Amino acid sequence: MGRKGKKENEAPSKEAFDPLAVEVKMPITVVLLLSSPEEDILSKSCDAIYKYVEKADENKITLLGLGVLEPLCQLICHSNTQVRHSAFMALGTMSTNGDVKEGLKKFNVIPPIIHKLIPEEDTVVHEFATLCLSSLSADFICMQKIFEYDGLLPLIELLSSPDPDVKKNSLQTIYNMVQDYPSRLAVHELGGIRPILELLDSDFVAIQHLALKTLQILTTDKDTRETFREEEGFEKLMDILSNPEFADLHVEALRTVVHCLCDSESLRLLHKDGGLTKLMEFVVKAPSPEIQSSAAKCIAMIVKCVESHLQLHEQNVEKIMVELLSVVNDSVKTAACQALAAMSSQLAKDTFREQKGFPVLLECLRSESYELREEATQAIFNLTADNWLNADTLYKVGGIDILVLKLRDPCPRLVANVTATLSNMARQEEIRCNIVAHGAIPLLVNSLSSPNTQVQINTTQCLAVLVSDVDSRAELQRTGGLYPLVMLLQSHHNEVLKNTCWAVNVCATDKPVAVEMCKYGALEMLQEINTSEIRQNRFSQLAMDNLLKSNLSVKYSLESYLTPLDIITDGFYDVGKTNMGQRVLTLEELAKQPVNTHQAIIVINTGEHVSEEKQNAESEIPSKEETKTSRRKREEEKRKDDAQKGSAEKPWKLVQDVAVRNLVNEARRSILPLKDEREQYAALARLVSDSMGGPVEKEKLHEFSWHHHLSEVKYGLQSNIVPIGMVKKGIYCHRALLFKSFCLLCSISPTASA
């Protein structure tokens, strides 16, 4: 007893320190106290920081500058529950500031935060830990770290927390993360669809909105849509849309429905439950443009299903969409255009025309909204595809004016749509001529250089349709369109290449155009294409054949023969045998080369055009005096031009072959009076033979010095090009060319062609 009483009256230990109440007024002091070993001081310091940063965002910046983040990141792992709570409250609240978020990225704070999402931790930790993650997950790098450290599963589990703040913060983090595709798939695989759907029944509107926004992204994935449908998510969406009390959720609900309607099963559910009627009511009577726009997008998805066309038609969908094109809101008009573009049935197209929809649709092209202009041109293209009446109606309401103008638009998709529409319309001759008259070809030439593949496909197709006459092909050549067109033959995109070959094939029917395309290497490119099993197409061989047909000099050089149907005209030349893949130079290019020891280039230039009137007319042979006079006149004019243009070069011209003109006249005088065709051929053959050195026996051909003769002519002319009339010693190839050209000029069939 006495010992016990003595102990009770014993004085306090000398080592103990009485509690000290200190008033702290400076933030730096509180930050310093975070290093204290005493748990009570740590807890109170964290509480003080929490209250301080709640007052203003500026306070968060102040503490950031004082280095508060490092001790707070350490204290969230403290063994003391109260310290941990207070540290999370302070850190979570601070993390909502952008600068603080950047500062937190320097610390490996995400793993310990995720570790504290376990069920054993209390609600306060869960609330502020998820708040911190929701802030950090807005950053892509942090989002990836949360994914890498398996943060999605505990976040999905916390969606069932009794605390609404924990639910909201967890859902916000998930929403941020599903912007990234791997996280999107993971949420589905981890069973996140059902708990997110359950949040649609939350008493808190913010959570409902966030749940719908998250589902809107998740349902972009096909497998997720299937699970969503199995969990009766589609029915829940329709229930929300049917409930006027949930009007504030209708926009997000409709946007999610748009994704769901990609699947035929969801479409079946829509028809089964009368959802189509409900959607049409939203389109017509929507309380806001956002709802009206989203409902119209749903209709656009439904229209893609052929089975829905009749039901939509019965509900006057075409008329309603035309009416939407006249509303003020651009997003509504854009959605209406998307729906119209999806109306592929002829019934819908005809009904749209009857509703006088083209004028209002064209007005959409004048909008400042590039998205509206894009969707409007897509609708116009689809509505005119395979429908001549719609193409004609569009033409009659002035569609060509604005469509051609829109070829200048910087938006590639819009230009692609316009060119495709012009192709649809240009198949009617009157419309085609009108398109060309409105200046479409120069604008299409600009589009040939577009890097956009679809623009290339549609532009080459459009040009192939437009340049079906001589004048339009000449305009294409004049506006510099042949070079970029030929360059597209190098494309390895099958559709671009096919349409380019088609356009080249059409252009090649004109000799000047064909010659210029060959100058740019079109023939060599087509040869390479036609030897490739992958790149050749149904137009590539036709294009090459047409190029050769319009450029017989090149054909003769490559193939060494001409058919009876190949008509030689002025400007034809024999450059000798050329190998496949080697470009045959033009006469102008050959004329600029210095005299060489190679084979002479034989050229035909009778001075006559191949037409019936010219063939039957007698040509006047100029006298030597007239020739000298005209030559002096030309030289004088040339000097004047050189004086005016300085050093500018005049276009190269083929020198007139007076000798061959004399032979032509002689041939007509001696051949035409003969009635028997065999006699005509024989007489013509003798004339050709006599003009080129007469008959030569095969055994004495080596004595026939034709090589030496042609060399003398070349050096006398100081040119590698020799007019055929100057060939006085010619062998079979020279005689065959002269014979063939004379047959045409004398109006007899060139059966003995070269």
Image (tube, rainbow, N blue to C red):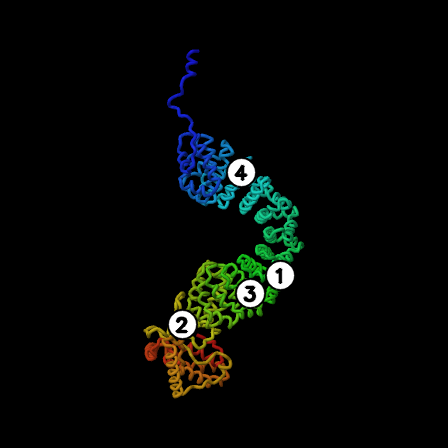
Residue underneath mark 1: 357
Residue nearer the viewer, 11 or 454 = 11
Determine whether the residue tagged by mark 3 lies in a helix, strand or loop.
Answer: helix
Disc 1 marks a residue whose amino acid type is Gly
Task: Identify the amino acid type marked 3.
Answer: Ile
Image location (x, y in percent) of residue 362: 58, 62
Residue at image point 63% right, 44% down = 245
- Please name the residue shown 40% across and 30% down the image: 37
Asked if residue 204 lies left or right of residue 489, the reply is: right
Q: Do the residues labelled 3 and 1 touch (CB within 8 Å)?
A: no
Residue 165, labelled with which disc? 4
Q: Which of marks 3 and 2 is nearer the N terminus?
A: 3
Marks 4/2: CA–CA distance: 81 Å
Residue identified by numbered label 2: 586
Res. 703 visible in picture: no
Q: How far apart are marks 4 and 3 (CA)?
A: 55 Å
- Nearer mark to the viewer, of 1 and 4: 4
Mark 4 neighbour density, 10 Å: few (under 14) some (14–19) many (20 or more): some
* Cα distance between the residues tagged 1 and 4: 51 Å
Q: What residue type is labelled 4?
A: Asp
Amino acid type, mark 2: Thr
Label 3 – label 1 distance at C-alpha: 16 Å
Quadrant for the C terminus in the image: bottom left
Q: Position of residue 321 (x, y in %)?
A: 62, 56
The answer to whether marks 4 and 2 mark residues whose Cβ atoms lie closer than 8 Å is no
Q: The residue tagged with tag 4: helix, strand or loop? A: helix
Q: Which of marks 2 and 1 is in front?
A: 1
In the figure, 400 relative to 195: above or below?
below
Mark 1 element type = loop
